[in-house]
Structure formats: structure tokens, C-alpha cells
Image: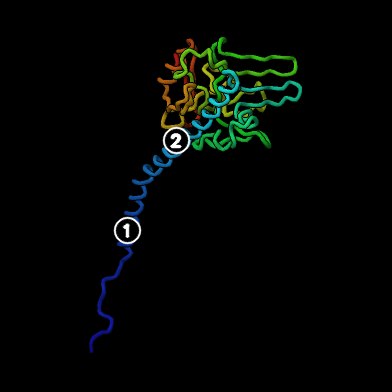
């Protein structure tokens, strides 16, 4: 009588270990590509966010005689209003979801205050529009004075903060001059920072492009932060 269970080749432990090793190897090879794809996707979202912020800024400029709000600080209440809060309050931005980069989660500084994209702070005096009273101080950019809008960035990836204004809820103000209270460009997208320029375009700017743009408006020290947050001087 024939055996009803003829010999079949078994799947040995050695073969199982080989398969597991091959899967692990494939995953190791794919993970960098998957991370790169994920980072690129976040970079695209960041650019789209800045475009929406920029569109709000263009509308604001058009209806405010060429002035673009930066921030307002009330000395009596110690409450600050930053650029994106003003854009929301005046109806130019319908949501705050677009004011932070997905590659660098927003930081909560208080119950209702979050850190978002930075706004350019250090600019030539002729570009400033300053309203200073004993009660409050307010800053705006006089955009009609800007000599080269295609090289004048306004919003973008930054890191740091302004401790002199307490809980000013910015993810660092973009500034060229290094200081303990200045925010810095954050080169978080493969060594570049996404920036919105006054002419309406968004650009992934590396260190050289940042230096070229800044030097259009004067010779200053420029520092930035690498992707991991380490500060570096990029000019001079």
C-alpha cells in the first residue's frame, strides 16, 4: 500500500532565516528612499503653505496702501499680535493651518499661542513703517520702497525666537543680524529654507542664495541653522 502522505520538501529554519534576512535587507535599502520621498512631500506642502500666506500678504498690501503688517506689541497688556494673527483677524487668512512648516512641528508657547513661519525683521530703515506710542509699538514693511521685490524675502522657514518680546509667537523672526533674540534661517529642506518673496514667488533658498538676497539691501552678518538646529555663520 502506498503512503498517503508522500514525501514533501519541508521549509527549514535555515530557509526561514534567509527569507527574513532578505526582507530586512530590502527594508534597509528602501527606508532612505521612503524617508526622502516623505521629506520631499513635506517640502511641497511647506511651499504651498507659504504661497497661501503670500497670497494673503499680497491682498493685504493691495488694500493697505502698500504696507505689510509685521507685529504689534501692547505695552499695557504685554500682548503681542504677530503677522499671521493679524492676517486671520482681518480675514485675509481663513486658517492658521498654513502658517507652519510640516517638517518642523509648531511649538506651543502658551495655551493659545503657537510658533509658525518667521517674518523678516532686519531691513533698511527706509523700508520701515513704525508707529511707536507710550501704549504700543507697531511695525510694518513699506513695500513700495523695496528696491528689488524678487530678492526681498518676507516669510519663511526659521528657528529661534525673540526673548525680548516674551511670548511673541513666531518660529523665530527671520533676521540677518545674529543675536540672542534673533531668529535665523532654518535650512531644513535638504540644506535649504523655503522663503516667500515680495514679488509673489516661493523659493527653496540655499545659503548662497540667502546671502545674495540679503546683500541686495546692505552688508550684514548672516547666520542660519542647519537641519538639526545647529547655528552656523554663512556670511561673511
Q: Is residue 57 above or below residue 127?
A: below
Residue 86 image point, x, y percent: 63, 28
Q: Residue at x 39, y 44 (%)?
A: 34
Q: Give the residue displayed 75% in from the left and 18% down from the top.
A: 135
- Above or below, 117 against 41 in this view is above
User: Can residue 149 be seen by looking at this rendering?
Assistant: yes
Tell me if residue 234 can be seen: no
Q: Outermost residue toward the left?
A: 1
Residue 46 place in picture, x, y as percent? 48, 34
The image's mark for residue 19 is 1
Vertical relation: 178 (above or below) 21: above
Q: Residues within 10 Å of mark 2 (few under 14, many from 20)?
A: many
Point out which mark residue 131 bears: none
Percent x, y of residue 148:
46, 15
Tell which of 176 and 155 is nearer to you: 155
Identify the residue at image location x=46%, y=31%: 188
Residue 115 appears in which quarter of the rendering? top right
- Tell me where residue 8 appears, x and y as whole percent: 26, 74
Identify the element where label 2 is drawn.
Answer: helix
- Color encoding of the figure: rainbow
Q: Quadrant of the C terminus?
A: top left
Position of the N terminus by quadrant: bottom left
Callout in the foreground (2, 1)? 2
Helix, strand or loop at disc 1? helix
Residue in the picture at 51% in, 14% down: 146
Residue matched to label 2 = 43
Q: Nearer the viewer, residue 189 or 10?
A: 189
Q: In front: 194, or 165?
A: 194
Task: Give the spatial CA distance, label 2 vs label 1.
Answer: 36 Å
In the picture, residue 181 is in which quadrant?
A: top right
27 lies left or right of 154: left
Sequence-earlier tag: 2 or 1: 1
Amino acid at each position: 500500500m502506498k503512503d498517503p502522505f508522500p514525501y514533501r520538501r519541508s521549509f527549514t529554519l535555515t530557509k526561514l532565516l534567509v527569507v527574513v534576512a532578505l526582507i530586512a535587507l530590502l527594508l534597509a535599502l528602501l527606508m532612505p528612499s521612503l524617508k526622502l520621498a516623505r521629506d520631499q512631500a513635506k517640502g511641497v506642502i511647506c511651499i504651498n503653505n507659504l504661497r497661501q500666506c503670500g497670497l494673503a500678504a499680497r491682498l493685504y498690501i493691495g488694500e493697505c496702501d502698500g504696507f505689510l503688517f509685521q507685529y504689534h506689541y501692547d505695552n499695557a497688556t504685554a500682548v503681542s499680535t504677530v503677522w499671521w494673527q493679524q492676517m486671520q483677524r482681518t480675514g485675509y487668512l481663513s486658517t492658521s493651518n498654513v502658517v507652519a512648516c510640516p517638517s518642523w512641528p509648531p511649538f506651543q508657547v502658551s495655551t493659545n499661542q503657537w510658533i509658525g513661519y518667521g517674518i523678516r525683521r532686519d531691513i533698511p530703515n527706509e523700508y520701515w513703517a513704525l508707529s511707536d506710542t507710550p501704549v504700543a509699538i507697531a511695525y510694518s514693511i513699506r513695500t513700495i520702497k523695496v528696491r528689488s521685490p524678487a530678492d526681498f524675502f518676507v516669510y519663511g522657514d526659521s528657528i529661534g525666537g525673540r526673548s525680548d518680546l516674551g511670548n511673541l509667537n513666531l518660529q523665530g523672526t527671520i533676521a540677518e543680524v545674529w543675536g540672542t533674540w534673533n531668529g535665523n534661517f532654518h535650512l531644513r529642506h535638504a540644506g535649504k529654507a523655503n522663503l516667500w518673496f515680495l514679488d509673489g514667488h516661493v523659493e527653496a533658498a540655499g545659503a548662497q542664495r540667502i546671502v545674495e538676497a540679503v546683500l541686495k539691501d546692505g552688508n550684514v552678518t548672516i547666520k542660519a541653522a542647519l537641519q538639526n538646529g545647529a547655528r552656523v555663520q554663512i556670511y561673511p
